[in-house]
């Protein structure tokens, strides 16, 4: 049996379609909060009626500036009410929003702006701006609320709807162009990952510009008529437990690093919480188990990337088996490919690939041709079990070379799942002396752990050539702003034993 699963057909977009119109299709008939931004001492909320009115008014304001369908708008907006209104308002009008992290410096955002050539920059005070000739717009919710509604711009579902940037952890960020049809690829996630219903109150712990937050934290709840909950900018993870309880969140979405920090906190009882969602990086089994033991709820992981929406996941109805990322979502077509470009037998490792016909796949990188051929190769090493469950091994360029064999760093890390005192770890290759390469394990713990204990864990679970030869405690593993491990930065942290 080959490592290929094709579960199409997928819902087909009508010839005249708009992503924002799809997301807000239920809004006119709902009398409930659509979005609440959680502050330590107060909340800001928008009802569905207000969200719809502001979106259409914002679209009118943007068109009044002389912008034309297809023009791009660079968003320099934080975790405020203005962010989703500008994002949806632009798409409603046929314009193309480009969300960016408020944490980027002037130099960083200048380089990104040059890639997308925006016709307008929407910005809030205090956020660095690019050195770019495009005019500036300050959000004005009061103005937008009173403007006549713009007509919904309809067109080909394949036309550009929005642009996001890759994280850039393996090089310079790439500008990823997505089509209006991308929202349809998310329909399968509501049941087959998120377990999301109209009665849910979903709290996402990330920044709104992050694709994980944007999709799972905002667009998905609104597509089904649920309530989105977002912590205000600058909210520390230590404040999340109280916010979760006060907001009566039923679903929590976050990166594994956030769950790890929450387990270190004084978690109150969370009687409304049904389960958590995890994405952004691999979810260690020990973390999933620890969360369940502490809260009585499960964590469901999804695998995706900036170039394509999540397509593999566990879910409340079909949890991922131990050690796997889960199953292919209905409507998707994926395969594990060998070096020859053909699916490998199940049980063998290869490169995870998604069909180029998938509606959630990007139109292409800005300035580059669209994906060619039958498969978009993700760069992730993976294997598929006989029942179709997929195990994510690592990024292909993260695989380690141990004694001439390619080894998944996640396999090494899993050997330390239950070691008391170790809260996170990451395997990497290092060169202790020029010309000599070994595997090292970097770990987070409250104190330096006995190396004898670490070696015993490795010996129990790993062949000799997979076992780390160097162990080193770090105060914190290197991570991006969204909590994703930056594995290639580990080697620079190496310190020779005294």
Image (tube, rainbow, N blue to C red):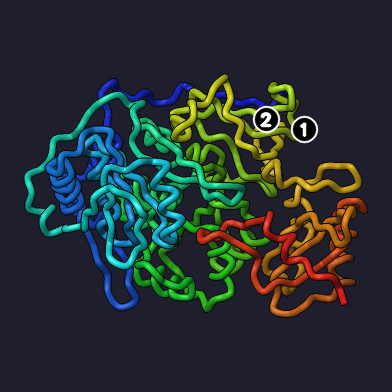
Q: Tell me where residue 41 sits by quadrant.
A: bottom left
Q: Residues within 10 Å of mark 1 (few under 14, many from 20)?
A: some
Residue 136 position within the rendered picture, expressed as x and y whole percent measured from the top left: 24, 53
Q: Residue at x 23, y 33 (%)?
A: 69
Q: Is residue 318 above or below residue 286?
A: above
Q: Is residue 103 left or right of residue 379?
A: left
**Residue 341 seen anywhere in this rendered image of the structure:** yes
Decide which of 457, 250 is in the foreground and name it.
457
When the figure is inspected, residue 24 is found, relative to residue 2, above or below; the finding is below
Mark on residue 420? none
When the figure is inspected, residue 202 is found, relative to residue 309, above or below; the finding is below
| Residue at the spot of label 1 | 348
Q: Quadrant of the C terminus?
A: bottom right
Q: Secondary structure at mark 1?
A: loop
- The reply to whether residue 204 is in sight is no
Depth check, front residue: 449 or 116:
116
Mark 2 sits on what residue?
Answer: 336
Q: Residue at x 78, y 62 (%)?
A: 441
Residue 317 appears left or right of 64 = right
Which comes sooner in the sequence, label 2 or label 1?
Answer: 2
Q: Are marks 2 and 1 in contact (CB under 8 Å)?
A: yes
Residue 423 point in image, percent of width and height: 68, 69
Residue 184 placed where, x, y %? 38, 33
* Left or right: 233 in relation to 351: left
Q: Based on the displayed image, in which of its 4 quarters is residue 476 positioned?
A: bottom right
- Dot 2: what SS? strand
Residue drawn at (59%, 47%) of the image: 171
Distance between mark 2 and mark 1 Cα atoms:
9 Å
Residue 75: x and y, percent?
32, 51
**Would residue 484 be found to the left or right of residue 76 on screen?**
right
Dot 2 crowding, Cα within 10 Å, few <14, some 14–19, many 20+: many
């Amino acid at each position: 049996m080959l490592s290929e699963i094709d579960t199409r057909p997928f819902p087909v977009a009508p010839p005249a379609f708009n992503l924002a119109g799809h997301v807000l299709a239920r809004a006119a008939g709902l009398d409930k909060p659509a979005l609440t931004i959680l502050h330590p001492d107060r909340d800001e909320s928008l009802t569905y009626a207000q969200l719809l009115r502001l979106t259409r008014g914002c679209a009118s304001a943007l068109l009044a500036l002389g912008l034309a369908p297809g023009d791009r708008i660079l968003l320099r907006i934080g975790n405020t009410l203005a962010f989703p209104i500008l994002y949806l308002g632009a798409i409603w009008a046929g314009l193309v929003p480009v969300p960016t992290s408020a944490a980027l410096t002037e130099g960083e955002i200048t380089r990104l702006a040059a890639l997308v050539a925006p016709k307008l920059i929407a910005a809030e005070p205090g956020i660095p701006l690019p050195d770019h000739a495009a005019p500036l717009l300050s959000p004005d919710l009061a103005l937008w609320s009173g403007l006549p509604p713009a007509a919904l711009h309809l067109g080909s579902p394949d036309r550009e709807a929005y642009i996001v940037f890759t994280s850039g952890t393996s090089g310079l960020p790439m500008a990823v162009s997505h089509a209006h049809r991308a929202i349809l690829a998310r329909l399968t996630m509501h049941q087959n990952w998120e377990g999301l219903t109209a009665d849910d109150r979903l709290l996402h712990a990330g920044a709104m510009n992050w694709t994980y937050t944007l999709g799972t934290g905002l667009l998905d709840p609104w597509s089904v008529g649920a309530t989105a909950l977002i912590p205000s900018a600058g909210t520390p993870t230590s404040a999340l437990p109280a916010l979760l309880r006060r907001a009566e969140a039923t679903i929590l979405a976050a990166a594994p690093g956030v769950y790890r920090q929450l387990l270190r906190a004084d978690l109150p009882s969370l009687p409304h919480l049904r389960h958590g969602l995890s994405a952004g990086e691999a979810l260690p089994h020990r973390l999933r188990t620890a969360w369940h033991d502490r809260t009585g709820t499960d964590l469901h992981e999804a695998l995706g990337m900036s170039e394509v929406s999540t397509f593999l996941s566990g879910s409340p109805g079909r949890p991922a088996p131990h050690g796997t990322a889960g199953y292919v979502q209905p409507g998707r077509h994926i395969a594990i490919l060998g070096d020859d470009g053909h699916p490998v037998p199940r049980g063998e490792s290869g490169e995870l690939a998604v069909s180029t016909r998938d509606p959630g796949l990007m139109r292409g990188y800005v300035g580059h041709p669209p994906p060619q051929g039958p498969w978009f190769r993700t760069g992730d090493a993976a294997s598929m079990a006989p029942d179709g469950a997929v195990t994510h091994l690592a990024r292909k360029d993260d695989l380690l070379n141990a004694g001439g064999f390619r080894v998944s760093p996640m396999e090494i890390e899993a050997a330390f799942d239950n070691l008391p005192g170790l809260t996170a770890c990451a395997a990497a290759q290092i060169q202790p002396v020029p010309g000599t390469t070994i595997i090292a394990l970097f770990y987070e713990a409250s104190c330096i752990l006995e190396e004898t204990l670490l070696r015993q864990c490795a010996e129990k679970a790993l062949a000799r050539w997979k076992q780390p030869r160097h162990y080193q405690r770090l105060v914190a593993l290197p991570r991006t702003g969204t909590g994703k491990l930056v594995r290639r930065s580990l080697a620079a942290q190496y310190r020779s034993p005294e």
